[in-house]
Amino acid sequence: MSVTQQQIAHHLDISQVEVSKFLNQSGIDWKQTTLDVIRVEYIRKLRAQASGHRSEDGLDLVRERVLSERVDRELKQFTLAEKKASSSTSRSSNQN
């Protein structure tokens, strides 16, 4: 039984535009998929968002946080290395 995006929207209590976005992001062929499967996938998407693992646009938030932490750590290491180099240079020039 094929359903329309409007029927899916009514079933999930969201707009047809949101249904369209969800189906595109999920890669679901709504013409070939049952309403039950679509509902389960939508619930899984909501759970992932609620747990903080996925953003609304599909980004993996845990991965993004890890990448951000890595950049912060590398910047701190770079700053520390610069300070050490600066400190060594000023000590050696003071000894002359």
Image (cartoon, rainbow, N blue to C red):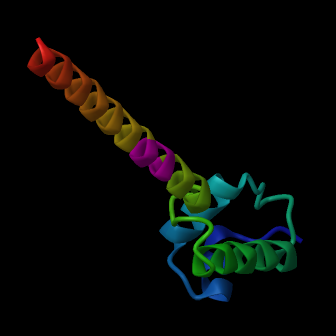
Does residue 6 sit above or below 80 in this rendering?
Answer: below
Quarter location, residue 85:
top left
Is 78 part of what is drawn in magenta? no
Residue 38: x and y in percent read 78, 72
- Residue at horizontal 63%, vertical 53%? 24
Question: Total marks drawn?
Answer: 0
Quarter location, residue 82:
top left
Does residue 9 sit above or below 92 in this rendering?
Answer: below
Residue 65: x and y in percent read 51, 57
Given residues 88 and 73, the one toward you in this image is 88
- Residue at horizontal 53%, vertical 65%? 55
Q: 22 left or right of 34?
A: left
Does residue 64 sit above or below 83 in this rendering?
Answer: below
**Where's the C terminus, which quadrant?**
top left
**Where's the N terminus, which quadrant?**
bottom right
Residue 45: x and y in percent read 68, 72
* Stretch in magenta: 68-73
